Image: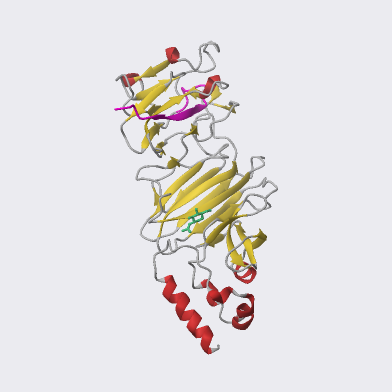
Amino acid sequence: MSWWTVIIFLAVAHAGVRANNVPANVPESEHPADIHRSGRFFPFYTIGRIANVPCTSPSGLSGTCLIAGECRDNGGLASGSCSTRTNQAVCCVYTQSCGGSTNLNSTYFTNAGYPGPYNGGGTCTFTVTPSSGICQLRIDFRTLSLEQPTGDGACNNDRLTITGGSPAVVPLCGENTGQHVYLNFVGGGAITIRVATNGGVSFNRLWNMELSQIACASAERAPVGCLQYYTETSGEISSFNYGLGANPALTAVGTRGSRQLANTNYGICIRPAGGRCSVTYSLPTTDRYAFTVTGDASAIDPAMVGSGAVGATGALCTTDYIIIPNPTGGGSDRFCGLGIDPVTSASTRPFVLYTVTNGNETPDVANRGFRLVYDQNACAAV
Ligand SMILES: *[C@@H]1O[C@H](CO)[C@@H](O)[C@H](O)[C@H]1NC(C)=O
């Protein structure tokens, strides 16, 4: 290599030991002429990984703005152009499927044959190893459609398991498009995502998971205890596999099945926006079954379902329930049953809601779980 290549290498290596959040800084070495010179024998541009400028592809995928050669060497696909200090950059999108692994940010893990469905059995795993300075993995289920659980809430035919991170995630199945989870890497170890499907059950499985690495120093890091973390002033949260239709599977005793997954226990957090001191949870106006957590939703008068009158609180909630800390007006923070009136919760930061289901969803006939609209409220004037 030429003498000045060595100098640039040293400069890049030096830059690499600075903090991870150093602003995007594309080394001079990414000039196309230099690529040619360094060739494939010494692709030193992968060393200065500070140049991880995010970009968005024309189809809306998250990518990393890189020179075409580095994108190719990393196994990525150039998807549109983007600007760094050089004008030769491409928006590099990484997509991998079964058996893959990565330590690169913004990688998509898809089913075999994606964007087509996978209707077969077996296991498909993907491993994410943290780069230095990375503490969390955010998994966005841009698409996640697996077979429904049994009517009793068990993911027996298809199951997505995520191991190696914390907090623990229960096996997931059913419809989870749009959901996400945050996991901490533990001791620099990898997180493994595994999808197991039962080939004896015909179903068009489809998944596309966006895997984002979050730096330890990042403001985007989810607080402790938050499996899910929402950062908007208002939005919607829902339980895993919440959906508008019922679960077509029957319970063990032949009644209509529940969409709720069994054995869940996790926190859903909301980042307090500036000047907001409490959050109000309410049901979407268009979805009466949006809080069907315990009891028989098939037996109740459809005009009643969703109202607080058919909900329950406190000691009546022992199997499946949500906890909304510090509800204004006092009263219990536990809610279950077949309806809920709007609840405002103050004090804890981040705002948090906990959800718990036990191992027995059989009595919870035709339940769907919950889907709540949240709105952060302005702090009272003092
Ligand atoms: C990973 O990419 C996302 C955008 O998709 C970005 O917000 C995040 O900061 C990146 N993480 C690192 C460590 O660069």
Q: Residue at x 53, y 43 (%)?
A: 159
Q: Residue at x 54, y 16 (%)?
A: 298
Quadrant of image for the N terminus: bottom right
Tell me where residue 357 sits by quadrant: top left
Residue 88 location (% of width, % of height): 65, 68
Residue 315 location (% of width, % of height): 31, 20
Residue nearest the observer in this picture, 140 or 257:
140
Q: Residue at x 68, y 46 (%)?
A: 117
* Residue 83 as seen in the image, left or right of residue 368: right
In the depicted structure, whether residue 368 falls above or below residue 21:
above
- Residue 353 part of the magenta-drawn span: no
Quadrant of image for the C terminus: top left
- Residue 373 part of the magenta-drawn span: yes
| Magenta stretch bounds | 361-382
* Residue 169 as seen in the image, left or right of residue 284: left
Give the farthest residue toward the front.
Answer: 382
Confirm whether residue 366 shows in the render: no
Give the farthest residue toward the right.
Answer: 116
Residue 318 location (% of width, % of height): 35, 24
